[in-house]
Amino acid sequence: MTKLYEEDQEAQGLSGKALWEKRLADLATDSILLPDGRSLAYHIDGDLALGRPVVLLLHGMFSSRLCWVAPRRPDHYALVAVDRPGWGESSDPPKDYSYMSFARDMEALMDHLQIDRFSVLGHSSGGPNALAVASLLGPRRVPVAACLAGDTEYRNASPETPTDPMSHFAFGCLAGPLKKPWEKLVVPLCTRWCPAIMSCSARIMACMAGTCTRLFVKTNLVRQEAEIWREDSPRSSFFMEALVESTSFGARPSVARSGARGFCHDFAVERNPFDFDAGGVQSRTLFWAGEFDDICLRPTLFNHHVLYPGSELRIVPNRGHVGVLASDTLEPLLERVLEAGVKEV
């Protein structure tokens, strides 16, 4: 547990779980019905009526809008967090759903909320979606697009395009001690030519995430993040509760959707060329990633150096792919997004 979490809990006299439940009660939760009949769930953290800056938050795979719930309610900005299609309480995405399809859904949501100007921040597979929103709506409406441990366009023709680390991670989970030869021989075959194997792997991982959530989440933390996962503590960490609850909420089946469709869609769409002009986004772009993020550090560097050479880059020390969601990283990133947004006015 980081010092930040301890101070928050001690100040309020709450355990991590009790503080988590208190923060959930602070959220204004709702959903909208999209033109094609799908439902899109979201929550608002903060007060939109005060006219403060707004940031739209997009979660990654095996997660939900709950990953963005922080120990403290924002006091000088407001957050709008969505369950992306196929996750949480949102409907499954339709066939041929793309990044630009999602961007149009976000346009409908923000129009519904009467929010004209906002920045957007995406984690992991939410990163390319954030760029798509900025591409569709332009810098007047979306001054800043930020990617936290975000993916890239793996079919990009650049010789610097990174290999597909998520494929290696996902299929490597099934290989056990044969991981290295499996990654070299089987993974390329699975990702390009065997969609049935990909679907099977997705369902297995979705089942693990929904039923063995605590173990699933813990295995995705790197050794350097041990301080934010303290099972030996008499009080559970707020962040630990947030990770487990967000993953369980995002992965388990719900009334609105199936259990694995979100992962199958995300995994597939990331392996296609972007359907928006990746290099043509005119909004201010920020790229942050953890120092020990084996999945998305190289994609982040590629995004920064190749697709967006004018962007800002920060490598967060002692963090991996999941730990960057902790408040000691997320709060400074949000402040930087707001600061960059002011400069773009």
Image (cartoon, rainbow, N blue to C red):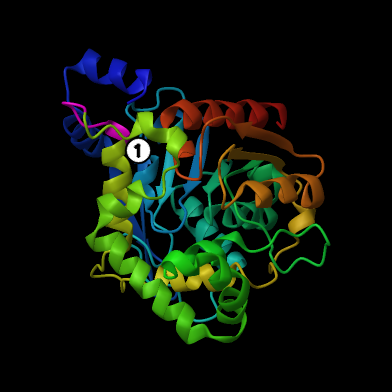
> For the point 29% across and 38% down, which residue is it?
240
Residue 62 horizontal/vertical position (percent): 39, 58
- Is residue 89 at all visible to an observer of this figure? no
> In the rendered image, which quarter contains the C terminus?
top right
Q: Is residue 234 magenta?
A: yes
Left or right: 223 in relation to 66 = right
* Relative image position of residue 66 (x, y in whole percent): 33, 46
Q: Name which quarter of the figure residue 20 lies in.
A: top left
Q: Is residue 1 above or below residue 311?
A: above
Q: Is residue 4 above or below residue 37?
A: above
Q: Which residue is mark 1?
A: 69
Q: What quarter of the picture does the N terminus occupy?
A: top left
Q: Residues within 10 Å of mark 1 (few under 14, many from 20)?
A: many
- Residue 303 in percent (x, y) is at 72, 50
Toward which corner of the image does residue 176 lie, by quadrant? Answer: bottom left
340 vs 322, nearest the viewer: 322
The magenta-colored residue range is 233-239
Q: Is residue 34 left or right of residue 131?
A: left
Q: Residue at x 63, y 25 (%)?
A: 339
Q: Indicate whether 253 appears above or below 143.
A: below
What kind of secondary structure does the magenta stretch mostly adopt? Answer: loop
Amino acid under disc 1: Val
Q: How many marks?
A: 1
Q: Is residue 25 left or right of residue 87?
A: left
